[in-house]
Amino acid sequence: MKTLIRTAATAAALATVTVACTSTAGGPPPRLKTSPLGAIRLVAYSSCDDLLSGLREHAAQNVSAYGFGNVMPFAALAEDARSAIPNAKADVPEHSTTNVHEAGVDEPDMVKTDGNRVITVSNGILRIIDTATRKVTGSLKLTEGDQPGPPADLLVSGDRALVLMRGGDIMYKARDFVRPGETKYVLVDLSGQPKVLSTIKPQGSYVDARMVGSTVRLVTRSQPDIAFPEIKEDASEAERVKRNQEAVRKAPADAWLPKIEITDASGTVKKDTVKCERISHPADYTGTSLLTVHTIDLAQGVTAAGTDPIGLAADGDTVYGTGGSLYVASNPRWWMPVLRPVEDTPATTQTSSGVAPAEEPTPTEPRPSTDPAPTDAPSESSPTESSPTESSPTESSPTESSPTESSPTVSALPEPTPTVPPEETEVHRFDISSPGAPSYVASGKVPGRLLNQYSLSEYDGHLRVATTLTSQDGQNSSSTVYVLKADTMAKTGEVGGLGEGERIYSVRFIGPVGYCVTFKQVDPLYTLDLRDPAAPKVTGELKITGYSAYLHPGAEGRLIGIGQEASEKGRTLGTQISLFDVSDPANPRRLSQLFQKDSGSTAEWDPHAFLYWPKTGLAVIPLFQQTESGALVLKIDDSGVSKLGMIKHSVNQAGIERAMVIGDSLWTLSYDGVQVNDAATLAQQAWIPLR
């Protein structure tokens, strides 16, 4: 059968990496060991029979006593708890755009502007605001009934908007055990009164999206639709696993193939399924999840090809895009051990993969494309390093069982013991330089875990990947930057030993230079020389208290850091904005720091919340304090950071989430409305209610 995904040369095996970590006692620090990392070339299934055989067997080896993802029923959990551009047109005002990772690659966000319009979506309602009259000129309710709409983001091209409505996700979008909800992509015509052109309902949960020109690539993640047998109260762990394995091995191919439902403006519904020959797989995969990449050109709308989907039998929670490449990365399945029995029949080689990765939520809502808030900062409100939501898995003891008459083979099964998956990150690259569906290029695997998409950067034919590797007991850690050849994803070089005993809090690659912040008690800012991919090296290091959770390029030779100040013992004290002089890579210096005691900012983990307007040096971040909330307005020039003032939305003291420059005005968005202030004097000019 014809395959639409190219098969590249097999990626060369990455060498076993040994990373040094801080010792808890005197003497040389212990070194973390990793398993050999083999090539993980993607291979297209040759037929539906081939797909079904592979997915069944891999999924059977990775199913737990509670199904896929080790999701225990809520009753069991309770019991366990008890027991233990500017636009180029002359008539368009000069304006800022969404703060994105790569220039020319737009990212979904709650608000967009083209200078003449502000388009925003919240609570299931899309609204269009005219920037000249400062009035809402159009609105469109995208949900039924009076229930609040799900979290949503926007991508806009011309008079077309794509609203990405995220349903509940599968554990790795939040700490809670959430059942998957409905994910919808709604294409809206913005000319005149907004109207729905089509609605796409993919099977699975929304991961992230990127738009180049008018073409959007969307990534969703689904799990096989398999009905597992009801759990008997007296059943042993081994018996439950065996019964679930039997259910997996009887499941049809249709259980794995993602479904798609498209409704056009007339209400006509078209249903489709991703074809077997459009699904590929790595050599090592769990069979418990499948990624689907959908393609929609906003200029053309949804054509007869639908969303032209391709699939990948893999996990994924991080998306990074350039003008010609789309990367999907899978962080380690670290948060809960995978329990597997020893079978009494021959089985295929078991993989080390486990359940889906977890992504930290923000204080407001989880936003998959943005930086997760640091979770091991030594503050009173942060989880400790040994908590289940941290990178060290929590071990559980298998329960004892006895033979049963109904399951004669079960008595021969010893109770499963916890196995901790290796802390590794897989990265898959797709070519998106041509119209239509992406083409697979290659895959790679590196030790450790990513912080977020800023841990990835493609430059001059290579992909740089920054990860932190933590020992299984959670006591030792160290970070490394790997350089992979983009066409094969084979390792070219690496530089390690960054922040021994700490973890990465922020990364930024700017051309051939890299900046990496690690933190536990003090903040080492490392500067990296990446000009020679085979021999990357650390050129400078700056140790200061606190940390930068987000790094942003400033003027020539300047780097802006948003994060938290901390005591010498590592206790966080409040938001700090730093300006670094990085003109001399061997001697990075902090030129200026502005500190706001007992405060926090979403800009620490959500770069879309940060506004920097280079023309005037204006910068804005949301700020939350015990006494007040608002938007902190700053002036950042070559020499320092200074405070210009604080913008507040008086209605209900609403927290400000976004800021935009349009002409000579500063626009700020909160849940309650949009406020317009003079960008120079900060005098209020208008209030546009959204409730």
Image (cartoon, rainbow, N blue to C red):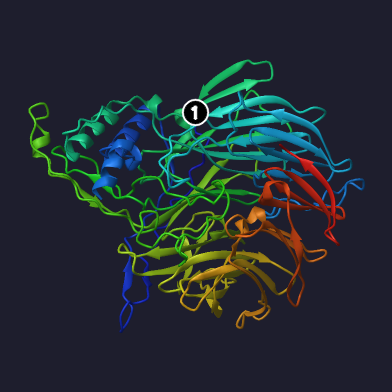
Q: Which residue is mark 1?
A: 274
Front-most of residues 689 and 404: 689
| Position of residue 496 in the picture relative to residue 404 (left or right) | right
Q: Position of residue 253 (x, y in %)?
A: 37, 26
Front-most of residues 135 and 534: 135
Q: Position of residue 36 (x, y in %)?
A: 33, 60
Task: Say which residue appears at 65% left-offset and 35% top-offset.
Answer: 163
Front-most of residues 180 and 581: 180
Residue 461 visible in the current orientation: no
Q: Position of residue 202 (x, y in %)?
A: 53, 30
460 vs 281: above or below: below
Q: Quadrant of residue 674?
A: top right
298 vs 686: above or below: above
Q: Position of residue 260 (x, y in %)?
A: 53, 26
As shown in the figure, which amino acid type bears the numbered disc 1?
Answer: Val
Residue 268 visible in the current orientation: yes
Q: Quadrant of the C terminus?
A: top right
